Image: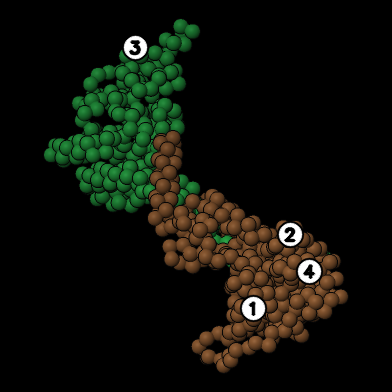
Chain colours: A brown, B green
Amino acid sequence: MDTTVLKCPGCGSSLPYNAEKGLWVCETCGAEFSQEEILKMTETKSDADIDINKSEYKEDTTPDPDQPELNLYRCQNCGAEMVADQNTASTFCVYCGSTGILKSRLEGKFRPKYVIPFSQTKQQAIAAYNGLRRRRFLAPKEFGKRENIEKIAGVYIPFWLYDGQSEGYVEGERHEVTKWREGDYVCKKTDVYHEYREGMESFEDVPADGSEKFDDDLMDSIEPFKLEELVPFNYSYLSGFLAEKYDVSAEDDEERANLRMNNSLKQSLTSTINGTLVSSKEDIKCKIEYVDYVLLPVWMLNTFVKGKPYTFAMNGQTGKIVGDIPIDKLKSFLFFLGMAVVGFGIAALFAWLID
Amino acid sequence: MKNIFSIILLLVVCLSGFAQNDKYSIGERTAEDLHVKKFQVTEANIEYVLTTPYVDTSYKIYDYAELLTETQRNAIKQRCREFMKNTGLDIAIVTLNENPKPSFNDYAPSDVYIQDFYDYNDFKEDGVMLIIDKFYDKNRYYDAGLAADMTLLGDRVENYADHMKPLYQDGDYYGEIMWFIDETEAVYLYEISFPKWKCLIFALLFAWIIWGLHRKKYKLVFKATSADDYKKQGSFKLTKKSTQFVRTFTTRTYSPKSSGSGSSGHGSSGGSHSGGGF
């Protein structure tokens, strides 16, 4: 197994990617390196020159069926041992804090084609988390406080980007209703029409995360990413962050993207109907034409509120933060009661005015 | 001008002769003393005022047609007092066996009479009244003021007719009157308490909507169900499109506009009123 530590060529310290500056900044001497410089270093120098060493150390890892597969690696910076599960591609040394990139995990079919570098810093992620409290007065008082953040980490999460075309039809009945009055009777005339629409639509870069570890809905919710900012993958972008390789194949993940594309085509087709279908059926199929494997930046934040864990995710590119915010039951009840009192007051006032 | 006034006065005096002279009256109405406190009398309604008997409002039951026994009249009077105590509304019950307004045939006489009887006597502004008119074989009821605002009787004409008509046809006038009082009291008490329930229901609904809308702010995680953000510009192609007429059908639902028959409309009353009958 390979581990890689990106080190400063000046002082030999760890050289993480700085999201705020968009540069690699040495934690010790402060030297800054641009994307071009880093790429030049990784392309022109040998692995040994930039301290990409092969670790010969590997402990016996006879799989335990009840435990996730864990492997031990030696930190190339301080020599300490690091533990990582089978899908981890980049991790931290708990002793020196340097990033250990498990290069072999991102090779061959696991090598991403593109990556979006982090634009949002850890401080911005914490500030966004704190900002979730704003105008959400039903959240428990413990929520949103920095001291309750259990863990925060920038993670490159594997995503599949699907290009495809949906094709099919929607048909159903549409009712046109006319009402009029005849004396004491209300008459309703209903004209029934059969509507049929058939068509096709193409989609580009529909994302679906390729990791079992991360909740699909959470990953859906941090969309959209500005995919025009994708850059060709380079290991150096992982410096300072965690990274995962995919454990859900493109074929297995395809259904999620298909469903989204088919739903969108259905909406496009029904939007051409002047009205709503009261009963409908459709047959829409999607054909995936192209798939890209990319790493997208996400700040994962774990917090405990009243002993219960909550996970939040922030789009590491756009800063959009998502997660279900806890609600204090007592506050919620009091708010409802307060609104009921206000509602009663409005109703009573209205009744008094019309009396 | 003097001549016109003299003609009107003469007409008024002649017409006043038609007004029922009865044991319930407490005086005669004259052009000089009309005994009307609640409404302004003008040239337009002076004739109506003068042809309306001026009665003692404490009787409550005015049995001109002599349809009831003395015992029944007393029982009804007692029940009317209970009604007034329970509801705060005034009440008047009138029976007739002759045309009460012979000179105003353009309106249904009892329709005119019922309003005038209530409005030009000193009944409370809020109240109800029933006329059993044997002359025209007709029953009328009337609500004024608050009772009219609530359309206490106006919205329930059919219900009143369904229950009172059989009693009327059987000659059970006492039963009919007592049913009218009981039902009106029950309806009023229900109506008067109902707004509190309406307010409470509105309050709960209001709280639920605001609470629900606010709670939405706490759920930020959703499954993505569409790929609208990833559509290839201009790629949507509609290859087949058809709209075919299949069938048509018509339904009719009974929904009366307003079940009350309304007032006679000659404008005797300045306050709100409504009524009905069968």
The label number, if any, that marks residue A30 in the structure image = 2
Residue A142 shows in this picture: yes
Mark 4–mark 3 Cα distance, whole angstroms, equals 119 Å
Do labels 2 and 4 touch, CB within 8 Å?
Answer: no
Q: Earlier in the sequence, mark 2 or mark 1?
A: 2
Q: How many residues crowd mark 3 within 10 Å: few (<14), some (14–19), many (20+)?
A: few
- The quarter of the picture where residue A154 lies is bottom right
The label number, if any, that marks residue B152 in the structure image = none
User: Residue B28 at x, y = what percent?
Assistant: 27, 18
Q: Are dots 4 and 1 on a single chain?
A: yes
The label number, if any, that marks residue A79 in the structure image = 1
User: Residue B227 at x, y = what percent?
Assistant: 71, 69
Q: Earlier in the sequence, mark 2 or mark 4?
A: 4
Pointer 1 indicates a residue of which chain?
A
Q: Amino acid at mark 4?
A: Pro
Mark 2–mark 1 Cα distance, whole angstroms, equals 23 Å
Quarter of the N terminus of chain A within the rendering: bottom right
Q: Which residue is mark 3?
A: B32
Q: Which residue is mark 4?
A: A9
Mark 3–mark 2 Cα distance, whole angstroms, equals 110 Å
Q: Are dots 2 and 1 on a single chain?
A: yes
Q: Nearer the viewer, residue B52 or A7?
A: A7
